[in-house]
Image (tube, rainbow, N blue to C red):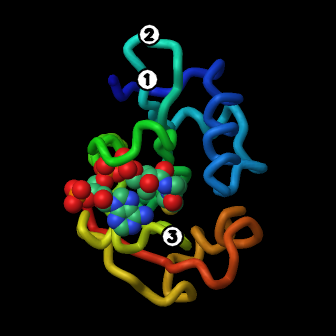
């Protein structure tokens, strides 16, 4: 398994993984893939996981973390988060926010701390994940990089 930058041709496969996991994908387009990473199988074509970030100044929304069901439990989720954090840091991002309904315990192990949703940066509140796609009950988390 290899983690690398997403290509435009990966869009459909990423959207399918997100759909299967019940995660928002309606707003995903080729432009947003600039900040996406994918987990590729040994055949280097199969997309078995993904994660992305949406930068807003020195903060960013970490989004769309997914690992294909058959590949879960092998450390790939943790590796994807580490890789996207490193990439965000290199692009000048100093803090990450995310919304999750199912994986708060997973992210807490990686240093993310629960915060009140309305205390997240104003710029992030206007992203489609915050504004429309994630349920109000989703937990908001924060990590300084
Ligand atoms: C969350 C997800 C990406 C984790 O991927 P993964 O490859 O299974 O994760 P890892 O193997 O790196 O897991 C690392 C550890 O976290 C634990 N973990 C995995 N998912 C977890 C979850 N949802 N809640 C709590 N702990 C979790 C694993 O058991 C493992 O613990 P261990 O080292 O003690 O065995 C994957 O379960 C997934 O795609 N879920 C559906 C989509 C989702 O909820 N995404 C997050 C939305 S923001």
Ligand 1 lies under 8 Å from the Cβ of mark 3: yes
Residue that appears at 48% across and 37% down: 49
Residue topped by disc 3: 102
**Against 62, is 144 above or below?**
below
Closer to the N terminus: mark 1 or mark 3?
1
Residue that appears at 39% across and 45% down: 72
Asked if residue 96 lies left or right of residue 22, the reply is left
Residue nearest the observer in this picture, 35 or 122: 35
Disc 3: CA contacts within 10 A as few (<14), some (14-19) or many (>=20): few
Residue 61 visible somewhere in the drawing: no
Residue that appears at 72% across and 72% down: 131
Which label number is shown at residue 43?
Answer: 2
Residue nearest the observer in this picture, 99 or 56: 99
Residue topped by disc 1: 40
**Whole-Å distance between the Cαs marked 1 and 2?**
8 Å
Secondary structure, mark 1, is strand
**Whole-Å distance between the Cαs marked 1 and 3?**
24 Å
Disc 1: CA contacts within 10 A as few (<14), some (14-19) or many (>=20): some
Quarter of the C terminus within the rendering: bottom left
User: Measured from the top left, where is residue 112 in percent x and y?
Assistant: 31, 71
Q: Quadrant of ligand 1?
A: bottom left
Residue that appears at 49% across and 31% down: 48
User: Measured from the top left, where is residue 133 in percent x and y?
Assistant: 73, 65
**Whole-Å distance between the Cαs marked 2 and 3?**
30 Å
Disc 2: CA contacts within 10 A as few (<14), some (14-19) or many (>=20): few
Quarter of the N terminus within the rendering: top left
Asked if residue 60 lies left or right of residue 112, the reply is right
Residue nearest the observer in this picture, 4 or 122: 4
């Amino acid at each position: 398994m290899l983690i690398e930058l997403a290509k435009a041709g990966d869009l459909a496969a990423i959207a399918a993984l997100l759909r299967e996991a019940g995660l928002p994908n309606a707003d995903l387009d080729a432009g947003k893939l600039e900040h996406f990473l994918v987990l590729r199988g040994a055949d280097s074509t199969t997309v078995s996981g993904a994660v992305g970030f949406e930068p807003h100044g020195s903060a960013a929304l970490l989004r769309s973390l997914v690992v294909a069901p058959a590949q879960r439990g092998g450390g790939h989720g943790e590796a994807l988060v580490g890789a996207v954090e490193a990439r965000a840091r290199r692009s000048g991002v100093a803090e990450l926010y995310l919304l999750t309904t199912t994986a708060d315990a997973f992210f807490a192990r990686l240093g993310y701390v629960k915060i009140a949703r309305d205390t997240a940066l104003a710029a992030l509140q206007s992203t489609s994940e915050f504004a429309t796609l994630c349920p109000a009950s989703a937990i908001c988390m924060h990590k300084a990089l």
